[in-house]
Image (cartoon, rainbow, N blue to C red):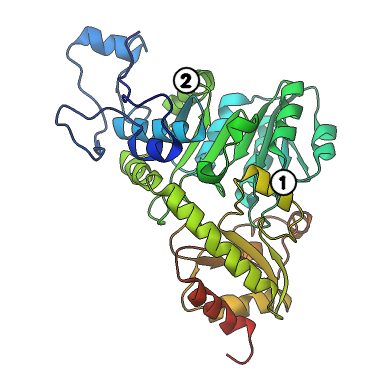
Amino acid sequence: MKKLPKTNLPADARLDTLAVREGLPPSQWGENSEALYLTSSFVHPDAATAAARFANEEEAFVYSRFSNPTVTMMERRLAAMEGSEAAIGTASGMAAILLLIMGTLKSGDHVVCSQSVFGSTIKLFQDFAKYGVQTTFVSQTNVDEWQAAVQPNTKLLFAETPTNPLTEVCDIAALAGIAKKAGALLCVDNCFCTAALQRPIELGADVIMHSGTKFLDGQGRVIAGALCATEQLVNEEFVPVMRSAGMTLSAFNAWVVLKGLETLSLRVRAQSERALTVARWLEEQPGVERVYHPSLESHPQHKLAMAQQSGQGGAVVSFIAKGGREGAFKVIDATRICSITANLGDTKTTITHPASTSHGRLTEAQRQAAGITQGMIRLAVGLDDVEDIKADLLRGLSPRL
């Protein structure tokens, strides 16, 4: 079968090089920056060629609901960076999880999922119970609980690491071993670390899920998502669902993410360093009960995180302000620099109250099980000056300012 052309990069090209050069070869015009293909459909030279392409007898661009050059460039670049054979872009991170579920599960199947994942992820898995897919939620960090939850019909294990917002870290290699033994897939949400810090495929994961809205874009501009996996999973399980259901990533959004990937490593590492500085400072503040960041020695999974995450803790810091919900709101409302929004991964530092925003749709019991208290604040550190971030938080933490 005729295939789409590939870039002529050395086989040993490293991550930072892949981040700026992987994709498709330039068009006949020889552009250096990747082109944005804003078109709904593609023209064929004749009817026979069109028939062959629609029948998947020739790899070509047909219709932008499921094939577009700009989207393909983003998919190839992300896959290369994550170390997977292929990737498929989606309209959002949640659309990626929906595609994962629809592509790999059926009525009667069972899922084991961390109880500490993003609130909407929990809700989505729960919603699929009405279609006959049952989910057991377990401790993020207790490998024995994951093993004990596996059933004969378990087809998928799902975890995000570090978690949102507690930054709990799971042992990817251990979960991969459980999944393999059970004949199930392991999907890891790599949103917080990205390939800049962590490559779950190398630790045995089968699928990597991304909300490209976060660090992949990096500047809070577009909504996007992706799944990275084997060519077999992408082409035989995910693409057919995408072709019918249309959780489509737009060419424009794909182009923004494509260009965001070029600076991903620089941004994530710089933001991680700033986050650690802020986290250590927060530990010293009398108005703070506890701080969560994987680079802190006080973090329960500190050693595991440093081993899995290239010695970096990531850009997200969560902390519990004294005074419960009222104390947390006081800190958030006093900020003048941090953006009060539930998004993260932006170059602008963002601050939010998870219990009433990102995890607001969960029951209080579910929030408590995940460790999300009313006093918790999530700070996603951007590229703002660290001293300005400290001063901004101190306005609400100190009664004198």
In the rendered image, which quarter contains the N terminus? top left
Amino acid on which disc 2 is placed: Asn
The secondary structure type at the circle numbered 1 is: helix
The secondary structure type at the circle numbered 2 is: helix
In whole angstroms, how far apart are the C-alphas of marks 1 and 2?
34 Å
- Residue 273 appears at what percent x and percent y? 54, 60
In the rendered image, which quarter contains the C terminus? bottom right
Amino acid on which disc 1 is placed: Leu
Return the residue at label 1. Answer: 304
- Could you tell whether 129 is left or right of 120 in the image? right
Return the residue at label 2. Answer: 235
Q: Residue at x 45, y 68 (%)?
A: 384
- Could you tell whether 364 is left or right of 11 in the image? right
Residue 343 visible, this angle: no
User: Which residue is the extreme one toward the left?
Assistant: 29
**Of pointers 1 and 2, the one earlier in the residue sequence:** 2
Q: Which residue is drawn at 81% across and 43% down?
A: 142
Front residue of 295 and 60: 295
- Residue 186 appears at what percent x and percent y? 66, 31
Label 2 environment density (alpha carbons within 10 Å; few <14, some 14–19, many ≥20) = some
Is 351 located above or below residue 313 in the figure? below
- Residue 91 appears at what percent x and percent y? 43, 41
Is 250 located above or below residue 348 in the figure? above
